[in-house]
Image (cartoon, grey):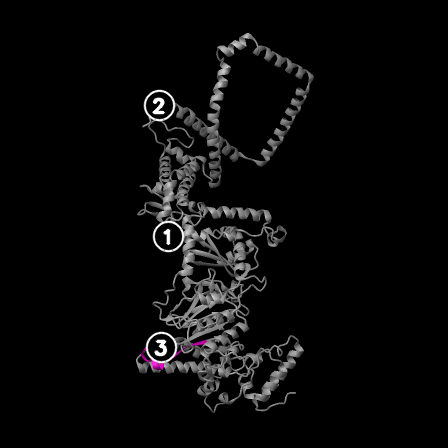
Amino acid sequence: MRVLTKETFYLIIFQWILPISLMIGGYMLLTKYVYAIYERLDIERFWKLLVKAGIVLGILIVLWYFVTNAEWFRTLSGYTKQGADWISNTDQAQSAVTAGASWWQTVIQFFLKWLPVYFRAFVLVWVVATGIFIQSMIWRIQFVRAGAIILSTILFFPVLAFKYILGYQTPFFDFIQSRLFIAKLKENLNDSYFNAIEGKDDQGKKFESGAGGTAQVQRIKATAVAVKRTRANVRTAGGVRRAELITKNSRETDTDKMIETALKGFGKRIVAPSIRFQDNPILNTERGGYIFDSDVSYNAGDELGTWKSIFFNPFADEIKVKNGGSGALRAIQSMYREVFKYFVHFTPPAIFDRIVNRERSLYTPDRSAENAKYKAQQNLDLSVIPEPVDPESGNDRDTQIEIARKRARERITDVTNALNTYKINGTFNKVLVGGNTAIYQYTLPRTADLPSDLNRVQEGISQLLRTKDLPVISIKAGILSVSLVNDVNIPVDFRNMIQQRNKGMKSIISAIVGVDALGENIYVELGDVIPHMILFGATGFGKTVSIMNILYSAMSAVDPKMLKIAYIDGKGNSFEFMRTDNKDSANYHPNPFTYAQPADASGDIEYARALLKHFEKETRRRIELFKQRGVSKLAEFNKKFPQERLYEILVVCDEFSAITDLDNTLKASELAEKGTVDTFEYLAKMSRSVGIHLLLANQTARKEKVPGKISANIGGRVSLKVNEPIESDIALPDSNIPVHLIQQAGEFYSTLNGIRNAEHGNSAYFTDDTMNALNDTLEGKFGHHDYVITREEVMNEIYGEESVEASYDVPEPMPTKDTPLEELLYVISNYPEWAVANKDSAVFTRNVYVNTDSPSERRKNKASLKEALSMAEKGKTKKVL
């Protein structure tokens, strides 16, 4: 065993401890001096001093130049050198060298011996200390406290690295952040608090012998001690980052008030990644005192991001300063910064999470079918659906996603600053992209003081960000989401929606309305829990497309023997292509799920009313049948009597308010027979148990257009953009989601899973050719299916075989509001009964040629139409040339 000798001990003391201590002390004096300069720094004074120093330095250099170049100076220098050489060559000088060192030689030898030692200490200390000093400035804490945090982290490095094995996701961050919180908390107190601990008064003078200061000073001392003993803990594991600061309360009320005052507002000043404390502490004596705490979801794999997304072309047009971009230099800086962040987050848990998520998505079996009532089929030939592309740029979906993510990340700071302007101090979690939208998510503190008027905040943020479209702010489970138009359209792929759907279904009508920003399906399950739904959407914002997403995804999963779909359109002929009885038509693409000929209420209101009345009768028939057989639900009936199995029916009614509005044209005696509001109400109340479900859609949610009798009995809601704020409250009641601010076609919010679980997504776009091709694939798979009931049978059932409504012919094809006036007059003359029955429909009231912009033409055309309808009502016809 090696013994520490006296020489070794002295060596350690004089060559290591003493030099390093001196260098540390010198550096601390330097930092103190730098802090003092920083506090007193005045840029104007600095420039004045710099100019003065430049003048003085210039004068000195000029003097030096003239002196050194003068002849007398050279002569004097020569004499001096000669004298020095003569002295050094004298016998006395030579004997001094040989006999022993003089005092000045001793000094030189001392410096030559110890200079390397102290230079080594200087390099070791000052280089490391400068890094610590820079970090202390970043953290905004004192140099000594920053050094203690960094050195303790180095000391505990093995222990912290071992924590990765135990399941901690970010042990180094947790350790540093917990100590940083305490350091910032201490610096939140002024010097008088710590003077009190040291026995000094406010002026820094020692208390007199036997005295401890005033009662106030004693309370200050107790407060400082409580703050110094604050416990901090940050723990990131299991997908959650938990953080807490606990400052012990005292035994005195006045001291507790001072402690609470010292901590007040501290929470908003110590924001850290995925940590958000409440602004003020909460007193909880059971947990130990005054508490700041935070629970925020955290996934190391998500924080890591993707390596590929870091790099882009810094010289692209959109990045150039002249085009409003940040410029190439800033773009390159951004890439370097993102590379550094990537390596900081490149930890074992992050790598593990990425691998697990990838393997789960590729190989995890779908077990949803094990306990589900029904198992989804795959009826569609997805190859007929073209790959979605952005129509403007021609980019595919993956390319648009990368572009959208980059643009969204560039605005994170701007969005955060805009929220802070309105004192919304949430912690940024992540940004999601989907459709034409970027969704910025922030975790709110537990005691968030939110503005009462979010509409004002939305308008203000729009002004701050200089966007023409208002953002949509929504709050759910402590997460604040800001949806902004991202100006990068990401097309939705219907093929992916079908391929990744759950195999297990809760009900036969299990559909998908679209996907959220993470690409996850948003389901529509119409069954026992949610039997019916209403979908709202202003004209041109994808209401019909969203309906088609629901319909085709439902058809893809079940057999036509299990589900039939009936179509009614209040303002047009949107579902005409679903017909199965128009074999001679050029647009013949029969769909085997179609229940009856689609009804066009804009031109055939009597049939639309009759079809609704038919479902009312079918509901009554099934209710009576179930009573006779002793069952209460369709599923029970089909299980008990499989040979008499009944299919479920989905009644799709687009623009249903156009149908209910026409009830106002009926006489009081006709309402019982033909009124539709009561029919919708009855179906909404009674048809749920017999397997008849409603999917109603409307372009407006105004109360005068959506009867309360109907909406009050339909809980399932999906809404695209609506036109007015009041409509948002009606479309998605009690959700506070401003769907009137939506700007992207196909973008929607769904509350089918409850108001607290509102879902935000986008629907896939279908062309007419794609829908026709899908009909053809279904026809090819299941064969041709005739209607369950024909139009003639429906009319006879409701109006009677001898009635006028059941006997009149209907024009083929049906006129629309875009039909030319001459052609419309011709149809009136040949189908007078039809014209009289539908005189209040959109075909006549909204005809674009009748309602022309020219006043004279409009009067003339309206007179011609009125005369034609009048003659039709009298049973006369007029030949139209």
Pointer 3 and pointer 2: residues touching (CB < 8 Å)? no
On whether residue 436 falls in the magenta region, the answer is: no
How many callouts does the rendering have? 3
- Which of discs 3 and 2 lies nearer the camera? The answer is 2
Picture coordinates of residue 368, whole percent (x, y): 37, 66
Say what amino acid the circle numbered 1 marks. Gly
148 relative position to 640: left or right: right
The magenta-colored residue range is 633-651
Question: Can you identify the residue that label 2 sits on?
Answer: 5
Residue 302 drawn at (x, y percent): 45, 53
Which residue is at the front of the view, 692 or 229?
692
Q: Residues within 10 Å of mark 2 (few under 14, many from 20)?
A: few
Residue receiving disc 3: 634
Instruction: State the image quarter where residue 637 is shown.
Output: bottom left
Amino acid type for the residue under numbered disc 3: Leu
Q: Residues within 10 Å of mark 1 (few under 14, many from 20)?
A: few
Of 734 and 390, nearer the camera is 390
Work out whether mark 3 precedes mark 2 in sequence or the reverse, and give the earlier one: 2
Q: Residue at x 45, y 86 (%)?
A: 798
Looking at the rendered image, the quarter that the C terminus falls into is bottom right
The residue to which callout 1 is attached is 238
Is 639 magenta? The answer is yes
> Marks 1 and 2, Cα distance to the nearest angstrom?
53 Å
The quadrant in which residue 399 appears is bottom right
Q: Nearer the viewer, residue 53 or 220?
A: 53
* Local crowd size for mark 3, using a 10 Å CA cut-off: few (<14), some (14–19), many (≥20): many
Where is residue 546 shown, x and y percent of the image? 49, 69
The residue at 49%/21% (across/down) is 112
